[in-house]
Image (cartoon, coloured by chain):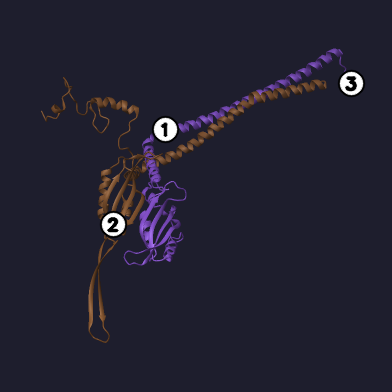
Chain colours: A purple, B brown
Amino acid sequence: MRPINLLPPEAVRRLAARRKVGFWVALGLLYVAALVMGVMWWNTRVDATQEALEEQQAINAELDAEVNALVAADDLAAQYAEQVLLTSVVLAQDVAWGRLLNDFGRLIPERVWLDSFVGTSLPGTPGLVGRVAVAGRGFDFRDVSAWLRSLDEEQFPGIAGTWVTNASESGSAVTGETLINFDSSTGLTEAAVSSRLEERIPVVVPG
Amino acid sequence: MSRRVTALVLFVILAVTAAWWFFLISPRNARIAELRDDRDAAVAEADRLRAAIAQLQAVQENDVAYLAAIGKLEAGIPKRAELAVFIEEVTALAEEVGVNLEAISPAEPAPVQGLDAYEIGVSLAMTGEYFELLGFLFGLDDMERIVVVDSVAITATSAGAGEVEETTTTTTVAGGDTTSTTSTSTTTTTVPWIEEDSLSIALSIKLYTRSPLLPILTAEEVEGEGGAQQEGDNLEGDAAEPGQGIEFEPVEGPPPTIGEASGGLP
């Protein structure tokens, strides 16, 4: 059966318009509510993060207090570290002169002897820890060559760049024989550094 | 609803949503990111503090070992110059290894750049044999105090030139004759001979100390010390408690002349 609307058509239109407005207003309100809810949710996130931070800060304060309670140990450790640093700097390029001279004595060729030896440490020079200059004598020029070979870097670690700046003939006052006087210099590398730094620093905490 | 109204409504919704995001949510997101960064930093700090606590607890447990280590290191670089001790030690070492120590020339402590320490340059002159010198150098290395050898200069002593007596025996046999003549001649030659102490050795070494020769006081310390010195401080410059030290009574009248002052005890 076909429904019969007895209301006048204006009233029906007004009712429809009111419903439409109501619908849009409700939708608008929902939209605004969603926005407000969103803001509130973000606020809870901010609060939660803030809370986590405060919790961590409280833990840190406790840890700080623990560190402060260990101030005596801290002073002790600082004193030790300072002394270690000082010793390390002082002995960083300490040349083992005793060992070096011992090696010189061992490796010097049979027919060569030295009149003078001047060794100088050169702290702060990159690649070099010192220099050695010697004045020596041999019986002929082959002995000068033997001297250079004896200071070869491969068999004498710690020595580099051995050079002879002058080799000249002269007569011996004792025997009257002809001798060769020579001047030589060489550089000292890191291998000439002593092991005193490792030996001098006592390790107190293993690892 | 007309299309224009729909478009307008959509535009308004978009605009409001954008404004909501930029003015309300974005600042909160930024705040959350900031708080998270702070928390991460705090967590890292906590880890650092925990590691520090573990380390300090280890130090506390091993405090005796630390004190011993500091003592050993301080013996290497003492707080005071302790030159007298060094001279005694170096003399004893020279006697022990057999070198003849001829001169010790210590310089005053000079500050080391970049370090809270002072270095004392010492020149040593001695004579001795090669192996005695080696013993001396190894002995310096083994000293409780750190001695760094800066330079070593060794020369064979030619100043000790002396005379050598050479005896030559000549035997002459004349032809088939069985008689022979023997003549002995002695010649004296001057040679750069090598004495028992054959090497002249010059060492340049460095010692280290933690304090200068004279105390360097800060302005505040000087102000503090000033009062104490008026009260009568000792010559060492150590801080004296008020009332400590020698107190002088003021003398009235003109100051005494030299003759009077050196007139002996009253």
The residue indicated by pointer 2 is B159
Q: Is residue A55 above or below residue B159?
A: above
* Separation of marks 3 and 1 at Cα, in angstroms: 87 Å
Secondary element at tag 1: helix
The location of residue B165, given as percent across then percent down, is 24, 67
Question: To which chain does the residue with label 3 belong?
Answer: A
Dot in front, 2 or 3:
2
In this view, the residue farthest toward the bottom is: B176
Question: To which chain does the residue with label 2 belong?
Answer: B
* Separation of marks 2 and 1 at Cα, in angstroms: 73 Å
Q: Is residue A119 above or below residue A145?
A: above
The location of residue B241, given as percent across then percent down, is 25, 28
Dot in front, 2 or 1:
2
- Specify whether B139 is left or right of A26: left
The residue indicated by pointer 1 is A65
Decide: few, some or many residues near mark 3? Use Cα within 10 Å; few <14, some 14-19, many ≥20: few
The residue indicated by pointer 3 is A2
Which image quarter: residue A172? bottom left
- Specify whether B42 is left or right of A114: right
In the image shown, does B102 or B248 lie closer to the viewer?
A: B102
Do marks 2 and 3 share a subunit?
no
Residue B144 visible: no
Secondary element at tag 3: loop
Residue B155 visible: yes
Question: To which chain does the residue with label 1 belong?
Answer: A
What amino acid is labelled 2 in the image? Ala
Q: Are marks 2 and 3 in contact (CB under 8 Å)?
A: no
* Separation of marks 2 and 3 at Cα, in angstroms: 147 Å
- Residue at the image point whose x is 35% and y is 39% from the top: B110
Q: Is residue A119 above or below residue A143?
A: above
What amino acid is labelled 3 in the image? Arg
What amino acid is labelled 1 in the image? Ala
